[in-house]
Image: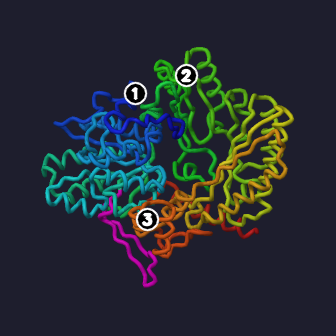
Amino acid sequence: MKKLYGEKIVREITDQKTYNQNLTQKLLVSPDLRQDKLGYNSDGLNMVMAMPDIPYAFWRGSGMHIVANEVARQTSFNVDFGYLPFPNVMADAEQNGLKTLYSHENIASADILGVSISNPSLIMGLFNLLELSGLSVNREERKKRNETQQRQPLVVAGHMGVLNPAPFENYVDAFVIGDGDEAMPRIAERYEAWQSVTNGKDRKTLLHLVADIPGVYVPEFTERKYNDAGELVDVIYNGNSQGFVEQQVIGNLPDFRRASLIMKKGKEAFAFIDYSCKYKCGFCQMANIRGKYRSNAKEQVMRYLQEFDDMGVEKVVLAGASSTNYDPADLKEILEWAKANLKTAKPVIRSVRIDDIDKIEEFLDQEYLHIAPETGSDFLRNKILLKTIKNAEMMPNIERVIAEKAFTEVRMYCIVGIPTETIADRMEYVDLIHRTAATLKQHKGRGEIRIDMYPLMPHPGTPFEEFGMIGPHKLSAIAAEFNAAVRAKLPREISFKLNSFDPTPHILEGVLNTGDTSAGDFVFDAYKRGGDLNAILLAAVRKRINVGDYISKGNWQAKPWDMIRLVNHASLPKIKRHLARNIKLR
């Protein structure tokens, strides 16, 4: 058996129906999910919520499950799910069309296809999902097919990966900008009203109806203007009377379930203990575009834990930006209650601010310490990344926790390609690793340190949205330099693993985060030529996009997402000015 992402793949299964039946037998479905609406109804309206990724991503897609359930709960629609098949069942999907998980119906027969794009690099997965479903990838082609009575579902995309929807506009009919808990049920209602009046004809009327929903963006009504140099200079949106689409955030946290609705048997579930983040780190989309921090009531979190315990779930991740955001007294009460009352479900804390670790240190009972210094330089961390934590606060806490807890493994994040970054800055991170290794050796006699290295991404809605980023060649050189420096002075009792970013999604995310519609066309060109790294590099050459040492921001003066009003639109310019002043300090 081959393992992929820790899941056993039954290689002898080659048809989707058997694989889906095998998968559903391994899934737990929460009693909060509208199971009476789960699966197609041939006499009604149907929505498929799909993840353009392998099943591992699908069953961890808690937000997608929550949105699907809101549609089932609030409207007449039935819901089913889809994902990209593993290689052993790909031939069946290519021959017979991509099937839904519970009903084994063709995804193409859905009325609405909702696609969750957590990262823009999933755009190739979107192309693949549409093609396997027998749908036209291009939205204009789908529009023409609808005019000739070849009905195509309304394709709606949402999640963090489409906050800049421009690269996806030629392939998606409508976008939900922000949380979809309220918007997707409204889209379903408008679709039903349109269907009953027009019998599925006059697609433009449907697009007008959904464009009037808060948080819904319809590219059909966008006009883009360019100068003689080909730079984007203006974006005009006529989809609503405002001339822009306002990002949606959850209005009242307890109104929407924030925990897993579908999960693997005997594995782990998620219970979201909060929303947004108290710490406004400059590189983080969650901190910048989720709005005001709100915590979930401890009674609600306990209800999730009890429900998961009744289902036999083993681990429940108390998920959020950082567990140290949550009130320590409430967290202590939750964990003590769980220890006294639950049989199988064990609450797990994974996201920890190391400078705040004293708030929750007594609750840490897991196999490794997971922290995010991001960089070893106080200047880069505090002045550029805008993360308020210093080495002098961090190292004593790391040393104390290793000494007092059973940890023998430490996992850290490292961001490189930060503006003004030098080799000396990166060597400060190397020194932090060596000090951590020495502490592991002193107190445990052995240990393992794992580093996940990422380039600084120019995410929309962050102070870095108008920056470029280092390319895969530069990242590879930095990773090699970093790896050699760590190993040069690493105690032999401590193992070390550096996970540097895969160049393919690195390039795609770098280009798509700030790209215009042409960026999506570049990726589609690469997809049609095989979609591998070589195809991407060749497509970049043809499109004159430099993706080697440095990936510049898109070719624009006006931002491609200027028709989108993110929640921090008023405060972001001030933060950008602050960042610019700090950069000049060097």
Residue 584 higher or lower than 387, as above or below: below
Residue 500 higher or lower than 42, as above or below: below
Whether the magenta-drawn stretch holds residue 235 is answered as yes
Residue that extends furthest to the right in the rendered view of this protein: 442
Residue to which mark 2 is pinned: 345
Task: State the CA–CA distance, disc 1 to disc 2.
Answer: 16 Å
Across the whole image, how many numbered discs are drawn on residues? Answer: 3
Q: Are marks 2 and 3 in contact (CB under 8 Å)?
A: no
What label sits on residue 29 in the rendered view? 1
What percent of the width, then of the height, locates residue 466? Answer: 56, 67
User: Image point 30% across, 32% down: which residue?
Assistant: 38
Q: Which residues are magenta?
A: 217-240
Indicate which label's residue lies in the foreground, 2 or 3: 3
Q: Are marks 3 and 1 in contact (CB under 8 Å)?
A: no
Residue to which mark 3 is pinned: 526
Label 1: how many Cα within 10 Å (few below 14, some 14–19, many 20+): some
User: Image point 46% across, 30% down: which residue?
Assistant: 264
Q: Secondary structure at mark 3?
A: helix
Give the side of residue 577 with respect to residue 262, left or right.
right
